[in-house]
Amino acid sequence: MSYVSSRTVGRTPRRSWPRKVATATAAAGAIVGLLVSGSGPASAAQPHAPSAAPPATTLAAPDIPLANVKAHLTQLQSIATANSGNRAHGRAGYKASIDYVKAKLDAAGFTTTLQQFTSSGATGWNLIADWPGGDPNHVVFAGSHLDSVTAGAGINDNGSGSAGVLETALAVSREGLQPTKHLRFGWWGAEELGLVGSKYYVNNLPSTERAKIDAYLNFDMIGSPNPGYFVYDDDPQVETLFKDFFAAKGVPTEIETEGDGRSDHAPFKNVGVPVGGLFSGADYTKTAAQAQKWGGTSGQPFDRCYHSSCDTTANINDTALDRNSDAIAHAIWTLGTGTTPPPGTSFENTDNVNVPDVGAAVESPIAVTGRTGNAPSALKVGVDIKHTYRGDLVVDLVAPDGTAFRLKNSSSSDSADNVIATYTVNASAEVANGTWKLRVRDVAAQDIGFIDSWKLTF
Ligand code: DTR
Ligand code: ZN
Ligand code: ZN
Ligand code: CA
């Protein structure tokens, strides 16, 4: 598709814009995601619909018994007590912890694998447990680190995450779950030495296998004694899944913003796997506002025994441990049994649509199907518009119900070429399924262009 470039000195004055638009924030950058759309461009008149997914139905997760989760913590505490007071990498207490978890999973019918590595001159292990069945090309993966620091038993950090993931896996077995996707669970070694075990796993996972992981969910500290309810702000669909789970229980959540790089989701995220997770807080101090919404004690750390000898079975808030363990099960059942497209799913229209010079707005449609509920609060809108004076252009995202979100205003001073950007839109008030449109209008004479492609990632 060719377009003519020319310049004029004066530019027609910009028009005032209808105000029924919401705002969006722009961020350059690529979108990493799974393309659901079929191959080959549809005609400009017809939306570029992905292969139609069956209506999304998911099985409801069972309640995860708090008593069972706490029984695992009691076992981990006993192991630490019998092994110099800790379960740290390279110490007897860590191998005993691995053996305990593996025995439970073997008895429950999982296919378990011990992956051995060396760090700081000591042998470490990752434990991977696969639930037989499900689509091997779509893996839903939940993990937690099993090692403690040398200072103590590490019951909240991270017996809590390890026990919550373990009990969810055992619930899969008890229910005889037959998920549509393949379920995998992991317990990492040497996280406290710098994410050593999870890095080793990802580094040794072929890229073809990495690509099969629809989502990696990380649980590191989920029972803090003065708890907060933090949701990782990584994959928008996973983030929304957890936020909606807690909202349905009347539990407010906050975004875990400083978690990047702080736990075992980081190696997965670094290779493009959609990630998410939950966190109840460590050594940061709970604010008065947070105590107001979550209870507990303001001015005190979420976990005053973080990395200390007092991180024992007495260092757990049962409500937080129970809620977060149930959230793990909810995520596994929702992502593992539903026909909802996996996290990081994109819908794309690659048809070229000409934008008339200083003319009427044009639209490029995308039909979104197979999703459940509303769009995420961080819906990614990837835009590629070829144009020789991008200041001429006004760009809106239009939701299926007609609500317009302003992505870009015109600017008489922005003479650069092309609009190639990714915008993040809070579309959580909009139903996800339906025909979304990219609306583009050229408001200044001379210079023309066309919509080359655009993409929605949930
Ligand atoms: N690094 C983890 C604890 C931790 C601290 N901040 C976050 C944020 C998100 C997850 C975990 C953490 C540890 O000490 O194991
Ligand atoms: Zn730690
Ligand atoms: Zn930890
Ligand atoms: Ca123009």
Image: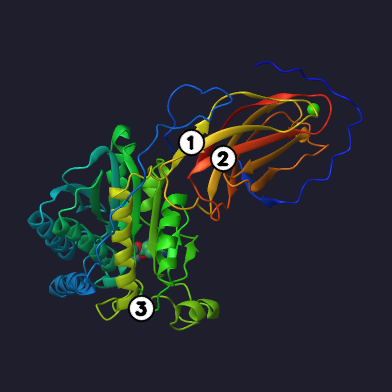
Of the two numbered discs 1 and 2 on the same chain, state the one appearing first in sequence.
1
The type of residue carrying mark 3 is: Pro
Q: Is residue 39 above or below residue 66?
A: above
**Label 2: which residue?**
436
Q: Do labels 3 and 1 touch, CB within 8 Å?
A: no
Q: Do labels 1 and 2 touch, CB within 8 Å?
A: yes
Q: Which of the two marks, 2 or 3, is nearer to us in this view?
A: 2
Give residue 346's position: percent from left, percent from top: 47, 38
Label 3: few (<14), some (14–19) or many (≥20) C-alpha neighbours in 10 Å: many
Q: Is residue 89 above or below residue 33?
A: below
**Left or right: 200 in relation to 303:** left
Of the two numbered discs 3 and 1 on the same chain, state the one appearing first in sequence.
3
Q: Which of the two marks, 1 or 2, is nearer to us in this view?
A: 2
**Label 3: which residue?**
225
Instruction: Indicate which quadrant contains ligand 1.
Output: bottom left
**Left or right: 61 in relation to 11:** left
The type of residue carrying mark 2 is: Trp
Q: Is residue 235 visible?
A: no
Q: Is residue 368 above or below residue 176?
A: above
Name the secondary structure under disc 2.
strand
Q: Is residue 418 visible?
A: yes
Q: CA distance from mark 3 to mark 1?
A: 42 Å
**Label 1: which residue?**
347
